[in-house]
Image: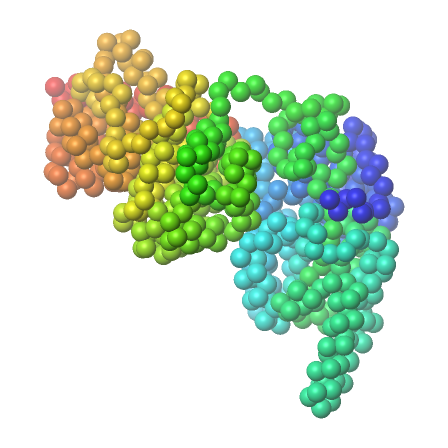
Amino acid sequence: MWGKWISTPNHYDSAMTSTPLLDKLDPLDTIRQLSLEELQQLATELRACTIDSVAKTGGHLGAGLGVVELTVALHHVFNTPYDLLIWDVGHQAYPHKILTGRRDRIETLRKGGGLSGFTRRAESIYDPFGAGHSSTSISAALGMAVARDLSGEQREVIAVIGDGAMSAGMAYEAMNNAGSMNSRLIVILNDNDMSIAPPVGAMSAYLSRLISSPSYLNLRNMAKQVVSHLPEPLERAARKAEQVARHMAVGGNFFEEMGFYYVGPIDGHNLAHLLPVLKNIRDDKTINHPVMIHVVTEKGRGFESPEASAEKFHAVSKFDITTRVQQKAKPSAPTYTTIFAESLVREATSDEKVIAITAAMPSGTGLDIFAKAFPERMFDVGIAEQHAVTFAAGLATQGYKPFVAIYSTFLQRAYDQIVHDVAIQKLPVRFAIDRAGLVGNDGPTHAGSFDIGFLCLLPDFVVMAASDEIELMHMVATAHSINDRPCAFRYPRGEGRGYLMPDSGKVLPIGKGRMIREGSKLAILSFGARLAEVEKVADILAERGVSITIADARFAKPLDHVLIKKLATTHQGLMTIEEGASGGFNAQVMAYLSEEDLLSGLQFHSLCLPDSFLEHDTPDAMYHTAGLDAAGIMAAAEKILATLLQDS
């Protein structure tokens, strides 16, 4: 970790309760009058406040602790919110929120009705762009910078992007575009992991201050004008000499080639190093092109815990402020993610062609389990979902059996590749779609709402959803067996139902559902993990003497036409239920019923996610709002049953 090279003392006491400087930052303008010593004290208070707050709420801790000094420096140097500050992803924005008028609400973070875990335009004028997914900040900032230029304004536009987010193609697309334009833009590379620069020290800090100073920039610009009048061979030689000298000093070759003026690396925890560079760039109005300021930080800075891991507390549960031990509930059943990973290992044990692919989420998708068993067949491609899909397509052309494990919300980023590189060529890529449905406190940016709809649109695509952990095991085996077309299986976040697992999964007949209970009048056809809630409703109705039919669709594509026709012709009412947006499974069923003229005389009702982006809350609360818990399903069932009773 770079933190080993950073000389700034790590002497923070997060148990402190006195925050005199932080208390005065209302309005935020006060921060611009603080001295260096006061800013250092403010950073100490801000770090303590961040730790205290996350101890009570849980959330993304490590990223925010790594940018405390950077956050203080940016708000001190720049005139936010007039100057636009864009944070990539948003995981690191908790200190920013505390400084920008939201400290009194910080303990509502990620709770229903409280602050978002990410930046959000509707929440504060200090959040000019919403976040949640990575690698968008440079594109958004460039758009804002061009708008500023067209409007004749003087405001600064600053994007802060992490080294991980820089692994995504979108960041390079934005840099390529920015580098070709004469538009002033400041990009801060927050490097907290990648070893892409030499150790940070006094000499590096001095060089960064030097090359960002007006005198150096003026000299450089003057030299450019001079050499432009030299014969072409001498001009090329002079430019090359200047580039070589700078790159030997600070290693900015790559960013310079992209069209950025590179400054760094700078110790991101040393305000005495940060402030002069930021001020130099701010004050030199002759710069009319993008600047890359490389800041090296330590993720999780100032937080020590007996549970510390390599991921430096990327996301944590609530924890004891004294012991630093997280308050995790003991699991009652394995998670769906774990069941998927263990099932995939089981399939790979008997087939050396099975490959696992993730996009920077090995532990989140459970593929760290696969990596331990088959390290040579596990590929983490970084934050590059588009590449992951086409990489898998290439493997599939050579007879391998790739499983691409990606959260539903992130799979959206690779839809063109799914259509063009996989579906059109009918390549047998298997998509393991984790976090399907509503995910809770990460809110609408992370909800798995749309995959059913956008995958069911594609010809010859097999789309499955697991209703419980045993079904998930079967679907992994089924996906393994499909060698003539692409397929996907989706499953929710959290624990399974606690079933005793079989020794191995069985291959399901493609496009065939299963009957769970048989009753009369009303049939409920469930697609996905809401089946448990449907069964609760059936139990309650059974106590009232009402017996309903329940079926598990298993497949949204191809549909089980035989099962659907049976339900429609032997019942007076039919409900479909799914954890996805309208236009998914329900649309497939409705289209079939219409084509077969089976809607006449049938009370048909579909339950799905509402046509809105649901705010963050607990998953249970969100499903209640959506009407997809037992109470909501019961209300819909009772309405249909009442109508049927009237008609009879």
How far from the left and from the top, in percent, is residue 511?
Answer: 25, 36
Residue plotted at (16% across, 24% down): 571
Q: How is the image coloured?
A: rainbow
Say which of 283 and 498 sits in front: 498
Quarter of the view holding residue 587: top left
Q: For this rendering, which residue is in front, 171 or 157?
A: 171
Q: Nearer the viewer, residue 270 or 510?
A: 510
Percent coordinates x, y for residue 345 in the rendering? 46, 33
Q: Quadrant of residue 187?
A: bottom right
Is 157 on the left-hand or right-hand side of 205? left
Which residue is at the front of the view, 282 or 518? 518
Q: Can residue 542 be seen here?
A: yes
Looking at the picture, does residue 519 appear above or below residue 92?
above
Query: Which quarter of the figure is the N terminus placed in?
Result: top right
- Please report the residue visible at 12 percent of the width from the left and 19 percent of the height from the top: 648
Above or below residue 356? Residue 266 is below
Percent x, y of residue 129: 57, 51
Q: How many marks?
A: 0
Determine if residue 364 is in view: no
- Residue 586: x and y in percent read 27, 37
Q: Is residue 234 above or below residue 291?
A: below
The answer to whether residue 381 is left or right of residue 528 is right
Residue positioned most to the bottom: 231
Say which residue appears at 80% left-offset and 53% top-offset.
Answer: 200
**Residue at screen point 23% across, 14% down:** 547
